[in-house]
Image: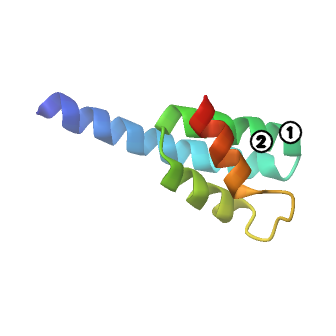
């Protein structure tokens, strides 16, 4: 029980750090941003988080097609 709680807290901390790091880098390089998004998805394995993350970092982007990203993620 304690191990599960600790694991959950560590994941929450890592998620927050990852958001901070990625948001900082979004300004500089789209490729880096996309690679980070894929890493983020595979690390947390959550499509809901992934959609929220995309909308959070770039809500008005016209080059992000959420359905195709999720299809690619489901295949891998």
Residue at point 36%, 36% (across, down): 10
SS label for mark 2: helix
Residue at point 57%, 40% (across, down): 41
Residue 28 picture location, percent across and down: 88, 47
Is 59 placed left or right of 1 in the picture?
right
Residue at point 78%, 43% (across, down): 33
Is 58 placed left or right of 9 in the picture?
right
Say which quadrant the C terminus sits in: top right
Residue 10 shows in the view? yes
Is 28 placed left or right of 41 in the picture?
right
Per the rendering, the mark at residue 4 is none
Residue 5 picture location, percent across and down: 21, 38
SS label for mark 1: helix
Q: Looking at the image, do the residues carrying marks 1 and 2 touch, with CB atoms under 8 Å apart? A: yes
Is 35 placed left or right of 39 in the picture?
right
Pointer 2 residue: 34
């Amino acid at each position: 029980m304690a191990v599960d709680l600790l694991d959950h807290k560590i994941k929450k901390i890592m998620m927050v750090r990852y958001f901070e790091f990625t948001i900082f880098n979004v300004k500089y390089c789209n490729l880096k941003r996309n690679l980070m998004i894929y890493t983020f998805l595979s690390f947390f394995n959550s499509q809901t988080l992934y959609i929220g993350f995309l909308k959070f970092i770039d809500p008005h982007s016209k080059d992000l097609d959420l359905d195709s990203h999720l299809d690619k993620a489901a295949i891998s």
